[in-house]
Amino acid sequence: MIVTSDISELRAYRWQDRSVAWGLVPTMGALHLGHISLIEQAKKENDRVAVSIFVNPIQFNNPKDLETYPVTLEEDLKILKKQGVDLVWTPTIEDIYPENYQTYVQVEEFSNQLEGRSRPGHFKGVATVVAILFNAFQPNRAYFGQKDAQQLLLIKQMVRDLKFYLEIISCATVRENDGLAISSRNKNLSKQGRKQAVCLYQALAAANEAISNGNIKAESIKTQMKSIIDEYHLAKIDYMSIANPTNLKEVEIINGQVLISLAVFVEDVRLIDNMTMEV
Amino acid sequence: MIVTSDISELRAYRWQDRSVAWGLVPTMGALHLGHISLIEQAKKENDRVAVSIFVNPIQFNNPKDLETYPVTLEEDLKILKKQGVDLVWTPTIEDIYPENYQTYVQVEEFSNQLEGRSRPGHFKGVATVVAILFNAFQPNRAYFGQKDAQQLLLIKQMVRDLKFYLEIISCATVRENDGLAISSRNKNLSKQGRKQAVCLYQALAAANEAISNGNIKAESIKTQMKSIIDEYHLAKIDYMSIANPTNLKEVEIINGQVLISLAVFVEDVRLIDNMTMEV
């Protein structure tokens, strides 16, 4: 397994054999089973798999979130080697944002909804770093988790709009036994916080059940979700959304597919989760 | 010579033989000797040359400028065939900006200076369309004229920042016998306007002479430039600038290289020109 921070070296490996198809799994490290599912999917669909590890400072609207974001490089590299990854790119902040850096990509509509509204500047940072990674490596396919549903939509929109020549593949959210969506930020939860973090999944499961039972009123479903989360004293809702899954506009009456998503602070840790449901 | 508006067809030709190096000359059509010099340079440095023709609506801040921008496709294709161009891409507006388009690229500092200040939104439009062209075609080299000096700087900055995997090549401004920089917009000048349009070159030549004679005070040089332009009653100065050629910041005392640039309305036609000079 090649590990390099150097973009010239990265490109030398990437273009050694032009007939080889490469999958890229962009990560911020602190690897978990969610990332591993992306890598497994990438291995199935490509001749070679590259993983980038870069904690992108400009997508953190909250400096404390950046400060506490887990960094576990040594452990990550062991996992990647075991997974049979071919190439790992570990650029420094200066490699990605050299002095006098000043170019940004914005997916304008998606950037102002849900996560974008709660985290100003977040998606500008995401779109920009993903554009950089795509241009630097030019993968044939890139892999992202459904857990970050809005991020996935935004990246697909950017790829369509800016005509990046690659395919975006999404993989299902991986969950713990109790339903908690696996996330690097789960590591920052206390033991009690970890237990209460199940509230996101429970709220989504309740929404799913309500819809199965014929409830199609978004407000009523949100009220049920809220009452579940309110049972957990460490949890504080940031937002709940029942939206059209193609444009993220809120719906009042569920008809067809909807994306139900939510962000909840558990202790100081901001967690997100979502499910797509259909009437 | 292949002419296509279809991006799949474009990519099929571009990637037919992966070992072949392609140069791209992005244009808005209305081809003239300036474009031909770019094509000649591209032919020297690449195995194949592609030219795109697309009048990019989002870089026109002034709707009247867009309306009157000359379109001469039939003539353009004759010229390109004669020049031995391999591939011409003529996308429609819908090909570049399909329904629900929402992704934009901004080179933030360069976008607010000189041309950017006079033409709000212009450089956001330029950076965005150039990113689309680069991703769609993925040329090995792309060619731009020095006449649009700020555009050239901005594109180089974008390529550096977003790590586009290609080389930007710039070519010298081509001039008419009287010194007027060749531009598609010159076609919109009346006979009298065409005569008076020489004022931009004359102002730059006077600046050059003043500097050669030891004048290093920017304000004094601008006063000389202004007095020349004021002799032409159809000309109205938009801006004059004597700036650091790497960051476009205005200088007071010339020391080393400077970019002297100006924009002048001659009748209703906005013309720009520039020269790099050195003390």
Image (cartoon, coloured by chain):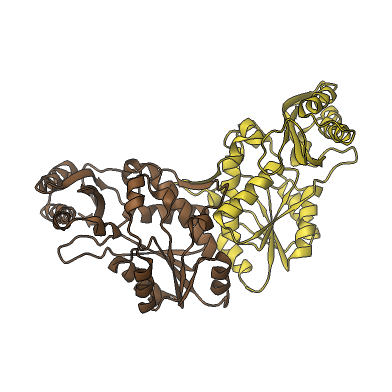
Chain colours: A yellow, B brown
Residue A83 visible in the shown view: yes
Q: Is residue B166 left or right of residue B250?
A: right
Q: Which residue is at a point 75% across and 41% down the rendered structure image?
A: A184
Q: How many marks?
A: 0
Name the residue nearer the viewer: B144 or A1.
B144
Above or below, B167 relative to B258: below
At which x and y percent is residue A265?
74, 28
At which x and y percent is residue A209?
89, 34
Q: Quadrant of residue B71?
A: bottom left
Name the residue nearer the viewer: B6 or A9.
B6
Above or below, B3 relative to B65: below
Name the residue nearer the viewer: B173 or B125.
B125
At which x and y percent is residue A135?
56, 58
Above or below, A156 relative to B175: above
At which x and y percent is residue B271?
25, 52
Q: Which residue is at a point 55% across and 77% down the rendered structure image?
A: B19
Residue B159 visible in the shown view: no
Which quarter of the image is occupied by the C terminus of chain B?
Answer: bottom left
Q: Is residue B98 left or right of residue B253?
A: right
Q: Is residue B25 left or right of residue A74?
A: left
Which quarter of the image is occupied by the N terminus of chain B?
Answer: bottom left
Above or below, A46 relative to A221: below
Q: Which residue is at a point 42% across and 51% down the rendered structure image?
A: B57
